[in-house]
Each structure stands twice: as C-alpha cells, then as structure tokens.
Image (cartoon, rainbow, N blue to C red):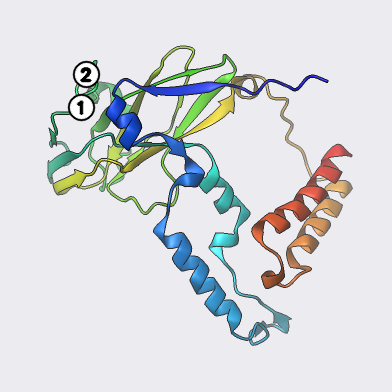
Amino acid sequence: MFRKKKPRARFFSLHPGVHTLHPITKASDLDRDWVKTEREDYKDRLSKCPFNKFVNGEQHFPNSIGRCPAINSIMRTGYIVYAPADFKVHTNGDRHTILFTTTPFAPPSSDYVVLHETDVTKWLMDSSKDNTIDQVVKINTPWRVQADDDVVFLQTKVPFVNETRFTAISGVLDPRTAYEVNVQLFWHVMEGDVTVKAGTPLCCYVPMSRRMLEDLDMSIDVATPTDYRLEEEFVFTAYNQFPENVNVSQRQIKTNKILRKYWNE
C-alpha cells in the first residue's frame, strides 16, 4: 500500500554559472570516445566467420570489453564532478615543486586550487612510485551536498576516461559531518605546464548506505555443494548462446535469475 521512500540527496552550487555550464551529472551521461570505437571494432570482428578460431578443439568467440557487465555497471554508477574553471599546473621535475595559475573564478570561501599540507598528507604517498608529485592537489569547488542520514558518498576516480595527468584520491564524503565538495588529486605530470580545462571530469561520487557500511551481516566460508551447482549454472548462462544473439542487458537478466535462485535458497 505504501511505497518505500527513496533516499534523498541534493547537490547545489554557490556559483550559478557552474550549475549552468558544468553541472554534476549522472555517470551514465558521461561520453567516453573509446566506447563507440570499441563497439565498431567488436562488430567488425564478429562479422567475420565466428567459426574460424578453434583452440584445443573448442570454439572461441570474439570478446568485447564493452559487453562486460562489470565495466558497463561501473561506468553507469555514481555522479561526476567536473572542473568548474580552467587551471594550470607547473612542475619542474623535482617531485615537490608545484605551482598553479587560475582564472579570476574562485569559490566563495577559499582559493580554487591549493595544496594540502605535506606533513599531513605524506602518509598517503607511495614513495616507490616515481610518477607522482609528493604533494596532494586540492580543488575547492562551489558545490555543496545535503543528504538523508543514511546516505554517504564514496569518492573515486572517474573510471575508464584515459586520464593520466591526475588521479582522484579515494575517500568517503559524509554529508552528516561535512558538506563541501572538494576533490583531492594525486598529480602525475612530473615536469611541465599542464592546463586542465573547465568541464574536465575530476572524480565520481557513488552514493551508499551508511547502515551497510557500519552494520552488514557478512560471512566468509568454504564453498558448499550448492555453491558448486551455482557455479555450473552460472558458467552455462555465459556460453549457451552465440554472442551476437544476446546483449549485455539480456545476459544480466539470465545471470541474475540464477544468482537470485541460489541466494534465496
């Protein structure tokens, strides 16, 4: 009779121009140039005779990373935060010196691009990596977030966008204790001048349930005979149809049916 109330969250920008030109978007709305190219490549390989490759007497079909359920799911999960304005980063090769040039744009409460104190963040740095500046870059955005008590956000890098200049640092944004949306970055360009343009994806925020983080009933076991039957049926769903006859959504429906059957048991 009564529908369960959806969890609520709200991002809002203290700068109206950012909301208009570079709004936070669903991850599923982010265009990745390689996706279309990969699909065309897969169709081309599939159009060739699918029976022309045998290994040890077994037929093998062309694989497609674009048809991988895990890849598709992660690219559709969460919300993308973009750079609200241009900024330039200068490094000189000493692994420590890093300077910024920004436009006149600035968030209301602080500078747009700053460095975290080295004494605080040095514990996060992997000294074995020679492609990362030993300071953390912080992007102060004009975005703020509000959410229901059970909602928190996992901050991650934006997956599969071929971004090599920086990596967003993982963390949890808890709207119950902090509501500023500021993005921390590992910087990978050791020497040179780099411009990050307004609208560049910076990080992804994935909403999660606080209750699941704090109070999940988790068990870790040795596989049972029932688990082995699940494995056999799961493998069967992956190979009982030609790849051109089933898309990602159809495959997920099949596997979900098997997984739910055994989970309910």
Kindly state the secondary structure of the residue where label 2 is placed.
Answer: loop
Circles 2 and 1: CB distance less than 8 Å? yes
Residue depicted at 72% across the width and 73% down the height: 242
User: Pointer 1: what residue?
Assistant: 114
What kind of residue is marked 1?
Val
Q: Nearer the viewer, mark 2 or mark 1?
A: 2
Please identify the quarter of the rendering in which residue 166 is found.
top left
Query: Residue 243 in the image: x percent, y percent?
Result: 68, 70
Badge 2 crowding class, 10 Å Cα cut-off, few under 14, some 14 to 19, many 20 or more, is: few
What kind of residue is marked 2?
Ser
Residue depicted at 60% across the width and 58% down the height: 68
- Of the numbered discs in the image, which one, if any, rests on residue 204? none
Residue depicted at 29% across the width and 37% down the height: 83
Badge 1 crowding class, 10 Å Cα cut-off, few under 14, some 14 to 19, many 20 or more, is: some
Pick whichever, 18 or 201, lies toward us. 18
As drawn, 149 above or below 138: above
Query: Residue 54 in the image: x percent, y percent?
Result: 67, 84
Residue depicted at 16% across the width and 40% down the height: 89
Query: Residue 103 in the image: x percent, y percent?
Result: 14, 33
As drawn, 261 above or below 38: above
Kindly state the secondary structure of the residue where label 1 is placed.
Answer: strand
Q: How many marks?
A: 2
Please identify the quarter of the rendering in which residue 222 is found.
top right
Left or right: residue 190 compared with residue 162: left
Left or right: residue 200 compared with residue 149: left
Pick whichever, 55 or 21, lies toward us. 21
User: Pointer 2: what residue?
Assistant: 110
Q: Quadrant of the C terminus?
A: top right
